[in-house]
Amino acid sequence: MRTQPHWDECLAEIAYVEANSIALQLKEYAKLNRYDCKGIKVLNKQQIFDKGGRSNAQIVWTEGPEDWAYTTEPTVISSVYTEAHDGQTLSFYNK
């Protein structure tokens, strides 16, 4: 069982920080292209783990362009790996 301090430490992981950075870029894209940017959600490790997932962070955007996660090529630093699981979810993993 993980403790709350463990989950709090996960908020400082590079994957979560990078996911938030990419989410900000997506929000700017959404504003410019008249999408609802409020639908862009960044999930932390605890939220993902509670749903059975294993990534360090995720961006979920269900109101965005179709298959945006497959076509988005974010600028990601070398210590983070990204993977699109479906067209609406981009997962981030620490390397």
Image: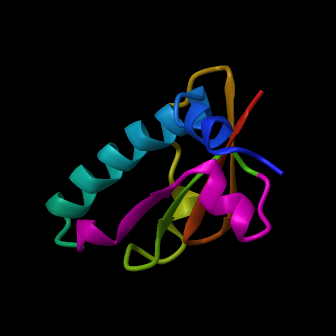
Q: Residue furthest top?
A: 78
Residue 16 rendering spot, x and y as whole percentages: 54, 38
Pick the residue in front: 59 or 3.
3
Residue 7 rendering spot, x and y as whole percentages: 63, 42
Is 5 on the left-hand or right-hand side of 18?
right
Q: Is residue 49 magenta?
A: yes
* Residue 77 against residue 36 in the figure, above or below: above
Q: Is residue 72 magenta?
A: no
Q: Residue furthest right?
A: 1
Is 55 on the left-hand or right-hand side of 74?
right
Q: Quadrant of residue 84?
A: bottom right
Pick the residue in front: 25 or 52.
52
Is 84 on the left-hand or right-hand side of 54?
left
The residue positioned 42% from the left and 62% from the top of the image is 41
Find the magenta span and give its range.
36-54
The residue positioned 33% from the left and 72% from the top of the image is 39
Residue 36 rendering spot, x and y as whole percentages: 23, 73
What is the basis of the colouring in this image? rainbow
* Residue 31 against residue 81 in the figure, above or below: below
The residue positioned 77% from the left and 27% from the top of the image is 95
The residue positioned 24% from the left and 73% from the top of the image is 35
Is 27 on the left-hand or right-hand side of 51?
left
Residue 5 rendering spot, x and y as whole percentages: 62, 36
